[in-house]
Amino acid sequence: MSELLVERLDWAKQAGLIPAIVQDADSGEVLMLGYMNREALEATLRDGLVTFFSRSRDKQWRKGETSGHVLEVASIDTDCDADTLLIRARPHGPTCHLGTRSCFGDTSAHAQPASFLEELDAIIGQRLAGDDASSYTRQLAAAGPARVAQKVGEEGVEVALAAVGDDREALLGEAADLAFHLLVLLRVKGLSLSDLSTTLAERHARQLR
């Protein structure tokens, strides 16, 4: 499959370079635009980490090779003309050298309430991929899936108890704790909010048939 992707691309159209749009695999946010030659794409497919071709330096460069903020590939697709790539990836830290998640600016301040779950899921993924020993997320994950599952159970009980009371703020607080720990559990088990959303959408589609 990887060889088929490389061979089907129209490398001659732009002098051996293909523009590659990088999109967050979980939130859908556009992170950056880079260029790949054949060797950069082959390295990306081989290693699972995005490698570009630098036109200014005239050489390949792996995104995050000095900062550690690599882009872990989830999928790679081409457009209908086979001259542009869409790379869905999971960023390990800020994508832009200016420290923002996206090279098109920090859009988190404009995020709608529902989309913050996607942002939180991405942050949890970054915490788990990082090396900050003081991170609660990392400490919880290091305790193992059983401990994370226990926390989800505990928070579920807290939500139920809060729901029978009249304190709306308490219910929201406990629900937020439950949502956070559920996202951590999904990540620990190799899943994400995107996988959960897909399952919900598939169930909904079946019910409409």
Image (cartoon, rainbow, N blue to C red):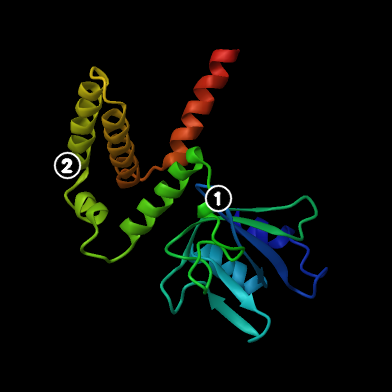
Which residue position holds label 1?
110
Residue at the extreme right: 13
Which residue position holds label 2?
147
Q: Nearer the viewer, residue 163 or 178?
A: 163
The location of residue 61, given as percent across then percent down, is 55, 78
The location of residue 31, given as percent across then percent down, is 58, 60
Compare marks 1 and 2 and give the one earlier in the sequence.
Answer: 1
Q: Nearer the viewer, residue 31 or 46?
A: 31
Vertical order, 118 against 130 (above or below): above
Determine the secondary structure under disc 1. Answer: helix
Of the residues shown, which amino acid type is indicated by label 2? Arg
Circle 1: is it few (<14), some (14-19), or many (20+) Cα within 10 Å?
A: few
Vertical order, 16 against 156 (above or below): below
Q: Which residue is drawn at 57% across and 20% down?
A: 205
**In the displayed structure, does residue 180 sit left or right of residue 30?**
left
Report which quarter residue 156 is drawn in: top left
Q: Is label 1 or label 2 in front?
A: 1
Q: Which of 71 and 136 is in front in this view?
A: 136
Quadrant where the C terminus is found in the figure: top right
Of the residues shown, which amino acid type is indicated by label 1? His
Determine the secondary structure under disc 2. Answer: helix
Report which quarter residue 176 is drawn in: top left
Q: Residue at x 26, y 52 (%)?
A: 137
Q: How far apart are marks 1 and 2 (CA)?
A: 34 Å
